[in-house]
Image: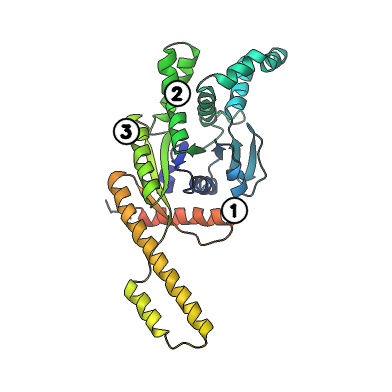
């Protein structure tokens, strides 16, 4: 199932803030790299969280760093992307330095509406299409984008069309069209949604799927439902355990049992909530869904991301149809 997803070169990962979007993007990047794909994880919001989750030091804006075999992390920044682009079309370094030092240039970069977003998405296009001078092929087999939180993601992904419509012709329109062609190509691109099975994240996911896939026509990928709780016991079983411990001595044992029963009821309640919203998600967002179990841990770093990556691969394998099945 993931191998099918990895057939697309550009995987954009979107979701509401706080649902584990960056974690899932990192886990996908690890799995792609583990599958032998030359992978770059492009972090758009410049928080540095992706690098930290993969055990790497902070990465300066506009730069990339190898963090594992076959895996780089790139800190994407609109201003740095514009400077890189101008460096490609202005070969004279002295002239380029004069442009960057110009007060007019810096004022324009600061106030031009949508410029940073346009250059950011243009940088992602460049990495997806980037040639490897040593082989003549593509530099990357997989470009995985950890997009900003919901509203900003929509703004970034709408920007190429907005720029194309605004300019109509000329350099900006041509470059915007190239980006639009990549984003709209289901053979090269997939928009993947990360959510949790709770009311507000589910509402935002349904709305974002409508905006990106139905209104903008971007090709959907997978739905990753993070932090799913599962009840391995019924309410009746919990009550039997509670009743069976009434005669426990000493008092500390009874307190421990009471806490276990309380936590079991809590987990059962979360499982019921998750199950309800999972049904709604699968009904309204008709995408292949991969559930990621809730990970009970006090710390979250590269080891936990590796566990999530293994869970993604395992869930994908379990849900893939067997040979001969429809």
- Between the residue at mark 1 and the residue at mark 2, the CA separation in whole angstroms equals 34 Å
Dot 1 or dot 2, earlier in sequence: 2
- Residue at 42% in and 30% down: 183
Contact (Cβ within 8 Å) of mark 1 with mark 2 = no
Of 179 and 230, the residue lying toward us: 230
* Mark 2 closeness class: few <14, some 14–19, many ≥20 residues within 10 Å: many
Can you say whether 318 is above or below 238 in the image? above
Q: Residue beneath label 1, please? A: 302
Taking depth in this image into account, of 117 and 218 the one nearest to the observer is: 117
Q: Position of residue 73 (x, y in %)?
A: 60, 40
Local crowd size for mark 1, using a 10 Å CA cut-off: few (<14), some (14–19), many (≥20): some
Name which of mark 3 and mark 2 comes first in the sequence. Answer: 2
Q: Position of residue 154 (x, y in %)?
A: 43, 32
Q: Secondary structure at mark 2?
A: helix
Instruction: Work out whether residue 10 or residue 208 is closer to the camera in this orientation and state it.
Output: 208
**Residue 75: percent from left, percent from top:** 60, 36
Q: State the SS at label 1.
A: helix
User: In percent of the image, x 63 and y 15: which residue is there?
Assistant: 105
Q: Quadrant of residue 227?
A: bottom left
Of labels 1 and 3, earlier in sequence is: 3
Left or right of 289? Residue 178 is right
- Observer able to see residue 91: no
Q: Residue 214's mark? A: 3
């Amino acid at each position: 199932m993931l191998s099918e997803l990895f057939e697309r070169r550009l995987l954009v990962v979107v979701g509401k803030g706080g649902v584990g979007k960056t974690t899932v993007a990192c886990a996908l990047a690890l799995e792609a790299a583990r599958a032998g794909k030359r992978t770059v994880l492009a972090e758009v919001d410049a928080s540095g969280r992706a690098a930290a989750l993969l055990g790497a030091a902070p990465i300066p804006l506009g730069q990339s760093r190898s963090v594992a075999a076959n895996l780089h992390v790139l800190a994407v920044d609109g201003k740095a992307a514009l400077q890189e682009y101008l460096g490609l079309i202005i070969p004279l370094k002295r002239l380029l330095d004069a442009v960057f030092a110009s007060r007019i240039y810096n004022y324009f970069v600061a106030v031009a509406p949508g410029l940073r977003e346009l250059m950011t998405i243009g940088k992602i296009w460049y990495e997806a299409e980037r040639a490897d001078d040593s082989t003549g092929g593509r530099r990357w087999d997989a470009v995985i984008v950890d997009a900003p939180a919901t509203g900003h993601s929509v703004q970034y992904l709408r920007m190429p069309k907005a720029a194309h419509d605004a300019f109509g012709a000329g350099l900006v329109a041509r470059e915007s069209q190239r980006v639009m062609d990549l984003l709209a190509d289901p053979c090269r691109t997939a928009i993947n949604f990360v959510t949790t099975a709770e009311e507000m994240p589910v509402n935002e996911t349904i709305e974002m799927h409508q905006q990106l896939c139905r209104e903008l026509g971007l090709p959907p990928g997978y739905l990753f439902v993070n932090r799913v709780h599962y009840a391995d016991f019924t309410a009746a079983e919990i009550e039997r355990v509670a009743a069976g411990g009434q005669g426990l001595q000493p008092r500390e044992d009874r307190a421990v049992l009471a806490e276990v029963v309380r936590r079991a009821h809590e987990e059962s309640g979360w499982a019921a909530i998750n199950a309800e919203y999972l049904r709604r998600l699968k009904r309204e967002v008709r995408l292949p869904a991969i559930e990621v179990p809730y990970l009970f841990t006090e710390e979250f770093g590269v080891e936990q991301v590796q566990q999530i990556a293994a869970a993604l691969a395992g869930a994908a394998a379990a849900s893939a149809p067997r040979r001969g099945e429809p």
